Amino acid sequence: MERIPTPGRWNAGCFQAYQHVFANVFNGNLAKYDPWHAAHRTEVEEYTVDNTTKCSVFRTFQGWTALSDMLPGQGLLHVVPIPEAMAYVLLRPLLDDVPEDELCGVAPGRVLPVSEQWHPLLIEALTSIPKLEAGDSVWWHCDVIHSVAPVENQQGWGNVMYIPAAPMCEKNLAYAHKVKAALEKGASPGDFPREDYETNWEGRFTLADLNIHGKRALGIDS
């Protein structure tokens, strides 16, 4: 088990919280693992490195809403529809073909990678969702391996929005406050690269333009 990241190699709070979340996986009780049991997921501080592309809020679902028709071969969503796949990713570094100092591509501040080098069976299992019409919405558990398929012989533009289900909790409220501070300055939020395109824009969207729902989402009382 020495290849499982220790607090020295991975944020201690993240390590301890994930040990609770995936306890049945690491203990060999996979049949008892319930990915919908969210008791300790809000305790995870998985990203201590800022200015990278990731999602540091707690999501009950990841959402994908099509703003245009989306067809196979045109950037449609691909998933690995296997509940046990996350256990495979977590336990993969423990197998004999992985060097002692290798964690199959895991790096601080990054999502768990799935690669052809270390996870060829999972890559083979990537499956396209059916075609979507504008307005269709797809939702999946955030541990599900997913990707956007490459575009082949592009036929017009495809537009989608990632809209996760993020319930109000201390973890998400803390991030909402960071988004509020970034919006005040026209800066990029913490979960995105520090591009700050709107800092000097005239007439940009501000806190004053928020309706009651937007204010509530950012933790603004009134």
Image (cartoon, rainbow, N blue to C red):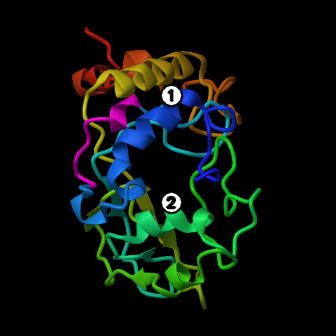
Circle number at residue 157: none
Q: Can you tell which quarter of the image residue 39 is in?
A: top left
Q: Position of residue 91 (x, y in %)?
A: 51, 63
Which residue is rendered at x = 34% and y = 75% of the image? Answer: 82
Identity, as a three-letter code, of the amino acid under mark 1: Gly
The segment highlighted magenta reads 35-43
Please determine whether, in this image, residue 169 is positioned above or below residue 184. below
Please state if 57 lies on the left or on the right of 134 as rendered: right
Which residue is rendered at x = 46% and y = 82% of the image? Answer: 126
Q: Decide which of 147, 179 is in the foreground and name it.
A: 147
Rendered-image quadrant of the C terminus: top left
Please state if 123 lies on the left or on the right of 173 as rendered: right
Q: Decide which of 213, 38 is in the foreground and name it.
A: 38
Look at the numbered disc 2 and give the secondary structure of its residue: helix
Identity, as a three-letter code, of the amino acid under mark 2: Leu
Distance of mark 1 from mark 2, alpha carbons? Answer: 18 Å
Which residue is rendered at x = 60% and y = 89% of the image? Answer: 152
Q: Are marks 1 and 2 in contact (CB under 8 Å)?
A: no
Circle number at residue 13: 1
* Magenta stretch contains residue 143: no
Look at the numbered disc 1 and give the secondary structure of its residue: helix
Please determine whether, in this image, residue 70 is positioned above or below residue 210. below
Residue carrying label 2: 90
